[in-house]
Amino acid sequence: KLRAYVKESDHILQLGCGNSRMTEDMFEDGFTSIANIDISKVCIDQMKEKHKFKSTLTWQVMNACHLDFPDETFDCIIDKGTMDSILCGEGSTGNVAKMLSECARVLKPNGVFFMISYGVPDNRLGY
């Protein structure tokens, strides 16, 4: 279903990648330009080592509320549980607003934002 919205050649940001297999699975399916960020240096170091021979995948320690990318960089942003995690912390509403503002800033015009969440839509769409 992702192919209905995203081309294999699109530049994708995986927001809060952790040690998920999602990027690896997407790479195997032909989506090769994926920037992966996470606040955990341990996760990023592990993923860099695991995928060191996949040069089109990048791995950076970064806070999703303060993205260090130029405006309009990505065709697609994928959030798999990052908003859920932020909503569990102190200052959650403000931090989610920062994260979404940053996503809007780095997403290209007509870009696509996917959010995979355990929350029900009524509890997430308000953000």
Image: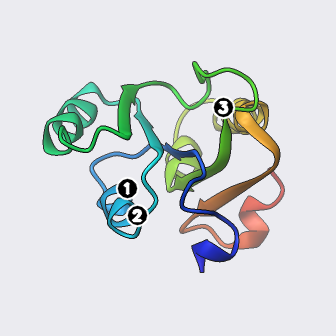
Please tell me the numbered disc located at residue 26.
2
Looking at the image, which residue sits at the far bottom?
A: 1
Q: Residues within 10 Å of mark 1 (few under 14, many from 20)?
A: many
Percent of width and height locating residue 75: 68, 47
Q: Which residue is mark 1?
A: 23
Indicate how the structure is coloured in the image.
Answer: rainbow
Is 33 placed left or right of 104 in the picture? left
Q: Pointer 2 and pointer 1: residues touching (CB < 8 Å)?
A: yes
Q: CA distance from mark 1 to mark 3?
A: 25 Å
The foreground one among 24 and 89 is 24
User: What secondary structure is marked by label 2?
Assistant: helix
Q: Is residue 87 above or below residue 43?
A: below
Q: Closer to the camera: disc 1 or disc 3?
A: 1
User: What secondary structure is marked by label 1?
Assistant: helix
Q: Mark 3: which amino acid?
A: Asn
**Residue appearing at x 77%, y 33% in the figure:** 101
Image quadrant where one finds the N terminus: bottom right
Q: Mark 1: which amino acid?
A: Thr
Q: Which residue is mark 3?
A: 95
| Residue 120: quadrant of the picture | bottom right
Percent of width and height locating residue 48: 22, 35
**Residue appearing at x 75%, y 24% in the figure:** 71
Percent of width and height locating residue 93: 72, 38
Percent of width and height locating residue 64: 56, 32
Q: Is residue 69 above or below residue 44?
A: above
